[in-house]
Every structure is written in C-alpha cells, then in structure tokens.
C-alpha cells in the first residue's frame, strides 16, 4: 500500500476538542451520551460506555460492554474498527450495508486478523446485539450495536483490559469496494484503501443508565422480532 493512501493524521490536541478530536454527542432519542469522531472520509464512530464501578465497591469489576454506532456515506462500502489500534491480534468490528430493503439494512461482522495479507476470520469471543438505529437511507448507512467482549480480551496469551481507560488507540479501515456477499456477516471482502489510527477520548461517553438504554433500544425487525 502506498503511503499516499494514508489519511491525514488527526492532530492529538486541537483547540476546542478533546484528545484525538473526539467530542461528546448526546442522542436525545436514546438518552445515550457518546464519544464521537468523524474522520475526513465522512465516517463517524460513536462509543457509549457504562459508568465505572465505584471504587468503594468491593467486587470492583468493570463491564466489558460498549455500544458502538457508526454512520457512513454510501460511497464507503465497508468500514471497520480495530479496538486495539492495529490490524492484527485484537477484536475487529466490521460493518457494511446489506442492500436489503427490509430487515437488517446494515450489519456488523465480528472478525480477527492473524496476518496483514490474510482475510480476517470470525472472532467468537465478542457478542453483538443490534440496537436502534440500524438502518440505511438514500445517502447513509448506520449500525448501532452492543458489543460484549470488545473492550477486554485475551488473545494469543495477551490480556488487554481497556474498560477503565480514559483514552485509547483505535484503528479504522474503510473501502469503496463492496463485500462479495453483503447479506452475510461471513462475507469475503478485500483490502482497505483507507486506514488510520487515532487516540480516542472515550471518557466522554460514560452512561449511568447504560443497561436501561440497551433494553429500551433493542433493534426490532419488520416482523417485530428482536435479533440478538
Ligand atoms: C482482506 C482484508 C484486509 C487486508 C488484506 C488488509 C491488509 C492490510 C495491510 C497490508 C496493511 C499494512 C499497510 C501498510 O503498512 O502500508 C494493513 C494495515 C491496517 N489494517 Fe488492514 N487489511 C484488511 C482488513 C482490515 C480490517 C477489517 C481492519 C479493521 C477493522 C483493518 C485495519 C487495519 C489497520 C488499523 C491498519 C494500520 C495499523 C496496522 O498496521 O496495524 N484491516 N492492512
Ligand atoms: C454472524 O451472525 C450470527 C448470528 O447472529 C452469529 O452467531 C455469528 O457469530 C456472526 N458471525 C460473524 C463473523 O460476525
Ligand atoms: C467461524 O464460523 C464458523 C461457521 O459459523 C464456525 O464453524 C467456526 O467454528 C467459527 N470459527 C471461529 C474461530 O469462531
Ligand atoms: C440519512 O441518514 C443520515 C445519517 O443518519 C442523516 O444525516 C440524513 O439526514 C438522512 N437523510 C434523509 C433524507 O433522511
Ligand atoms: C437521561 O440520563 C440522565 C443521566 O444518565 C438522567 O439523569 C436522566 O434522567 C435521563 N433522562 C431520561 C428521560 O431518562
């Protein structure tokens, strides 16, 4: 990949915005507060986390749940988040529109990469639940999911726990080329033309009523079914 395909590095400190350019976004429909960033390619990532356990709690154990919302223009045919800030050896959440006019109009695929020239395979230690809004319109596609297992993992003997961190390095990748079978979360897709790493301040998206917001916003399909 040519260096010129790299996106502009986002400045670590800019006036008026938090570290890495993350800002706080409150969603009135769900009452969730997200840390949010929009990359120069138009791709928006938002993350909402539960509040931290109180330090006086003797069973002090933080949740590995996170809500991830992505909003992308249709000019991007798939985009992903690398939770550990690099491509290999960390949970990857990959998203794309299905092209369907009913049901799930955009989906998440749980992946992990073991090499840069290998297709990322399915990662079964993260569990996803679709939330609202998960949809597509003429211009954009949106996926909102609860991920359990994206902020703490044990991979190849390495234990990583991001649940109590204030900011963390994330990686992203996007492509204009569609996955080969967009209706399936197992689809093949090719290499990204766009990728980058940024430092994300996700302390901006802590939520006291996290569980309540999850329960109140489960994605419901056309026939009233909940897809979990
Ligand atoms: C078929 C699928 C994929 C292929 C063939 C592929 C290939 C590559 C290659 C060759 C590089 C190195 C580029 C360079 O150093 O100039 C790279 C970097 C990167 N990729 Fe991928 N990739 C794929 C999918 C993904 C996915 C799904 C994600 C995230 C969800 C991702 C995230 C990244 C990131 C963040 C980097 C830069 C940081 C690093 O080098 O670890 N990639 N990829
Ligand atoms: C695809 O979806 C099924 C059903 O929700 C799930 O069990 C499976 O883990 C998912 N696979 C990937 C790669 O995300
Ligand atoms: C990936 O998914 C396939 C089909 O659902 C399953 O047989 C396989 O065990 C999964 N692999 C991993 C590493 O989860
Ligand atoms: C399509 O969805 C995007 C993202 O949610 C939104 O900003 C835009 O206003 C929507 N367009 C229409 C015509 O509703
Ligand atoms: C929204 O959440 C905040 C804090 O998380 C809470 O104080 C407020 O009562 C909530 N509002 C509604 C309408 O649930």
Image (cartoon, grey):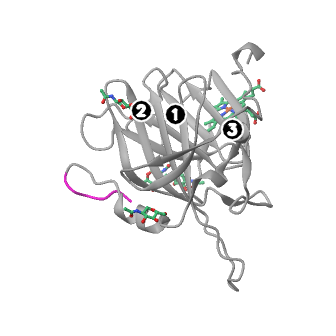
Which residues are the magenta region?
223-228
Q: Secondary structure at mark 3?
A: strand
Q: Residue at x 73, y 41 (%)?
A: 19
Q: CA distance from mark 2 to mark 1?
A: 7 Å
Label 1 sits on residue: 188
Q: Earlier in the sequence, mark 1 or mark 3?
A: 3
Q: CA distance from mark 3 to mark 2?
A: 24 Å
Report crowding for label 1: few under 14, some 14 to 19, many 20 or more residues within 10 A (C-alpha).
some
Give the prevailing secondary structure in the magenta stretch: loop
Q: Is residue 79 left or right of residue 75?
A: right
Q: Secondary structure at mark 2?
A: loop
Q: Are marks 2 and 1 in contact (CB under 8 Å)?
A: yes
Q: Nearer the viewer, mark 1 or mark 3?
A: 3
Quadrant location, the N terminus: top right
The answer, for residue 93, to whether it is visible in the render is yes
Q: Quick check: is the Cβ at mark 3 less than 8 Å away from ligand 1?
A: yes
User: Percent x, y for residue 77?
Assistant: 47, 26
Q: Quick check: is the Cβ at mark 1 less than 8 Å away from ligand 1?
A: yes
């Amino acid at each position: 990949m040519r260096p010129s395909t790299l996106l502009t590095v986002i400045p670590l400190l800019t006036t008026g915005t938090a570290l890495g350019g993350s800002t706080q976004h409150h969603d009135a429909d769900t009452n969730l507060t997200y840390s949010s960033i929009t990359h120069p390619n138009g791709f928006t990532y938002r993350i909402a986390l539960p509040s931290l356990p109180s330090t006086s709690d003797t069973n002090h154990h933080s949740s590995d749940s996170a809500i991830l919302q992505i909003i992308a223009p249709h000019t991007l045919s798939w985009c992903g988040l690398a939770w550990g800030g690099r491509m290999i050896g960390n949970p990857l959440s990959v998203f794309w529109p299905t092209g369907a006019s009913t049901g799930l109009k955009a989906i998440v695929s749980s992946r992990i990469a073991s090499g840069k020239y290998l297709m990322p395979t399915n990662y079964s230690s993260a569990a996803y639940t679709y939330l609202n809004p998960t949809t597509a319109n003429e211009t954009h596609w949106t996926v909102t999911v609860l991920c359990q297992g994206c902020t703490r993992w044990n991979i190849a003997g390495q234990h990583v726990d991001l649940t109590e961190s204030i900011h963390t390095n994330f990686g992203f990748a996007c492509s204009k080329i569609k996955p080969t079978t967009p209706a399936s979360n197992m689809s093949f897709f090719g290499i990204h033309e766009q990728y980058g790493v940024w430092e994300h301040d996700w302390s901006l998206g802590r939520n006291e009523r996290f569980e309540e917001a999850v329960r109140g916003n489960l994605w419901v399909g056309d026939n009233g079914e909940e897809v979990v």
